[in-house]
Amino acid sequence: QVQLVESGGGLVQPGGSLRLSCTASGRTFSTYTMGWFRQAPGKEREFVGAISYSGARTYYADSVKGRFTISRDNVKNTVYLQMNSLKPEDTAVYSCAAQKNIGSISNPGIYDYWGQGTQVTVSS
């Protein structure tokens, strides 16, 4: 069992930055691929990015590539989402998720554990 807790959301102006954190309970965090997803009101959940269990590989949606960076600290059981050059269309609830399954990392269906989400609002 893995419990995930996100933090770091808030209100930011367009062009600004935020860093989200997702801290996991348990001693097996380093064996999980971690993903970030977001969901805006009235829209489907959208893949943002993911990072392999070791941190050696990262994957991003085209909509955030070059602006967002995912990293992890397996000693602290934490994965981060650094968001730069934020746009109003980045406004959503952001959630982290953990999985060790085979399948497309952008498919939310293969993730076993989810955090409760944190709100990010980009507005002037």
Image (cartoon, rainbow, N blue to C red):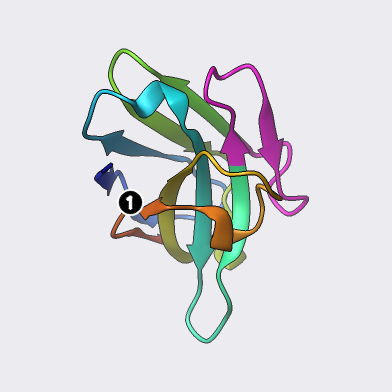
Q: Is residue 23 above or below residue 41?
A: above
Between 119 and 34, the one lying in front of the other is: 34
Q: What predominant SS class does the magenta segment belong to?
A: loop
Q: Left or right: where does residue 122 sit relative to residue 62?
A: left
What residue do we see at 30% from left, 44% from top? 8
* Direction from residue 67 to residue 84 in the image, left or right: left
State which region is magenta: 50-68
Q: Can you see residue 122?
A: no
Question: Which amino acid type corresponds to the residue marked 1 in the rendered image?
Answer: Gly
- Asked whether, in this view, residue 119 is left or right of residue 33, the answer is left
Secondary structure of the residue carrying tag 1 is loop
Q: Identify which residue is drawn at 73% across, 36% down.
A: 66
Q: Position of residue 114 (x, y in %)?
A: 36, 54
Figure check: 47 above or below 71? below
Which residue occupies the foreground of this view, 3 or 6?
Answer: 3
Question: Of residues 88 and 115, which is closer to you in this image?
Answer: 115
Report which residue position mark 1 lands on. 9
Quadrant the N terminus occupies: top left
Q: Is residue 54 magenta?
A: yes
> What is the residue that sits farthest to the top in this orientation?
75
Residue 55 placed where, x, y %? 56, 19
* Residue 11 seen in render: yes
